[in-house]
Image (cartoon, rainbow, N blue to C red):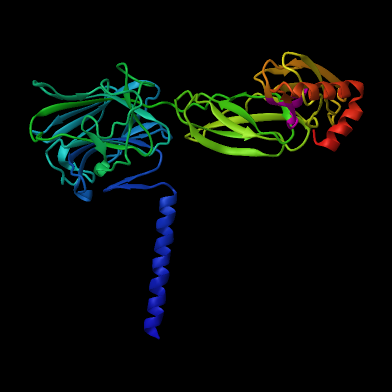
Amino acid sequence: MHDNILKKLLIIGIFILFVLASTITSIGVKYNSNQILPFGDPYFILLSDYTDGAGDENLWALQLRFDIDLGVVESEFDNKSLPLITDQWVEIRIYIDLNNDWMEIYYNGELLHQKLWSAGPDNTGQGIVNLSAVNLFSDLRTAVYFDDLTIEEVGGGIIWSDNFDSYEDGSSIHGQGGWKGWDNNSEYSAYIRSLKNRSSPNSLEIKAFSDIVHEYFGNYSGEFVYTAWMFFPENIKPYRPDIKGPESGGVGTKYDYIFDSIDPNGDDVYYYVDWGDGEVVEWIGPYGSGEEVKIDHFWSEKGEYEIRAKARDALDLESEWSDPFYVTISNPPAAPEIDGPPRVRVNKEYEFNFYTVDPDGDDVKYFIDWGDGYYGETYFYPSGSNIKIKHIWSTKGNFTIKAKAIDVYNAESNWSSLEIIVPKAIESYFNLKILSWLYELSPNVFRIIKYLFGL
């Protein structure tokens, strides 16, 4: 009995730990070896020892955290901070003296902190006197940019640099120039962009969750200056979206509408669309800043509708509502009736009748496909009018006249059709003459004979 109680308590304890672990994950804490990084900040990290797959054996010498909410850049192991500078290129400069196990950290030319290089994350002195790797990491949902990374040996000149100018704009940096994802993970990948650059044409874009590493070897002694330039955009809400598309149409027909918004920071954007009929599209995306996004919609009832949209960037900052885009939706006309002779002579003009009724009483026009490569479009006529249009076929054969009616609000009917024969043989001429004579004598009698004899 006592053992059963202990087992139940153990199971309950495990369940509680599982719930707690799930809760921690849900608020965005990210574990990267022995780093515990809160959601929403980019980092600049120098390591004194780094090996793929080594996990906690990797050793941190410096970890700068850039906190947009607090407006500070912080040497995170030491709680030393300076004001964060946004919307301009800022120099990060670290003076590293491996001979004397010392470093000095400068941000925008101002001393942030100085301490032992080998102090390690907990300042316990467990680090190694070696410059092993740089790690550029971000949990921020918008982009930050790095450019002109350089290691210069004091008195010895530049021993490594990367200004990203040799990369193609838009390319992934993973696997190029010695850069790779954390623990060589191919899912971690930053990108080369020309959107923000200190020295044209390119810079390195770090977005969540990019975690990019570059290793250096053999730097166990000497004095070095490590320089990196960083651009941290101040987040600005996207511009209100523009909307383009049809201003009128028919009930039940899908129409394409184009939405686009520019984000001043170049962040990806999402769209919320209110179609004005109770239907909405909730935050579809992400799409590139300025990218035209096509979304279709249909209205199920006649009426005047107002489309509105707004954009949201990757940090959930929303634009103003767009200007309203007005759409008029009407009921489509009935499919038109087509009446005329079923057999005609080549190179002779014949008259055909087109008729339809629009349920809303709107004026209509006709779009006609004569079946021989020629098309026609009429003016608008009152609903219920009988419209006569002439046509000539210049070749013999079987043709299909097709027509649809379109009202003044661009609501389109279904297609109607009428089969036409232009006889190919001489003996068809006599039949054609009789049929044409019957039609001219009495269209109603012609239709009866046509029905009885299956003409």
Instruction: Report the residue at 87% width, 33% height from top.
Output: 449
Q: Residue furthest front?
A: 427
Answer whether residue 182 is visible to the viewer in this image: yes
- Where residue 418 appears, as percent x and y from the top left, is 75, 29
Q: Is residue 95 left or right of residue 414?
A: left
| Whether residue 270 is situated above or below residue 344 in the rendered picture | below
| Whether residue 395 is situated above or below residue 333 in the rendered picture | above
Q: Which corner quadrant of the image does residue 110 belong to?
A: top left
Q: Which corner quadrant of the image does residue 409 belong to?
A: top right
- Front residue of 15 and 361: 361
Instruction: Report the residue at 86% width, 27% height from top.
Output: 361
- Magenta stretch? 398-420
Q: Is residue 93 left or right of residue 12?
A: left
Q: Is residue 55 left or right of residue 14?
A: left
- Where residue 138 appears, as percent x and y from the top left, is 35, 37
| Whether residue 218 is situated above or below residue 244 in the rendered picture | below
Instruction: Report the residue at 33% width, 21% height from top.
Output: 89
Q: Which corner quadrant of the image does residue 297 belong to?
A: top right
Task: For the C terminus, give its image quadrant.
Answer: top right
Task: For the N terminus, give its image quadrant.
Answer: bottom left
Answer whether residue 328 is visible to the viewer in this image: no
- Front residue of 281 and 256: 256
Whether the magenta-drawn stretch holds residue 400 is answered as: yes
Instruction: Report the residue at 54% width, 37% height from top.
Output: 284
Whether the magenta-drawn stretch holds residue 29 is answered as: no
- Where residue 446 appears, as percent x and y from the top left, is 88, 28
Q: Is residue 105 left or right of residue 398?
A: left
Q: Residue furthest bottom?
A: 1
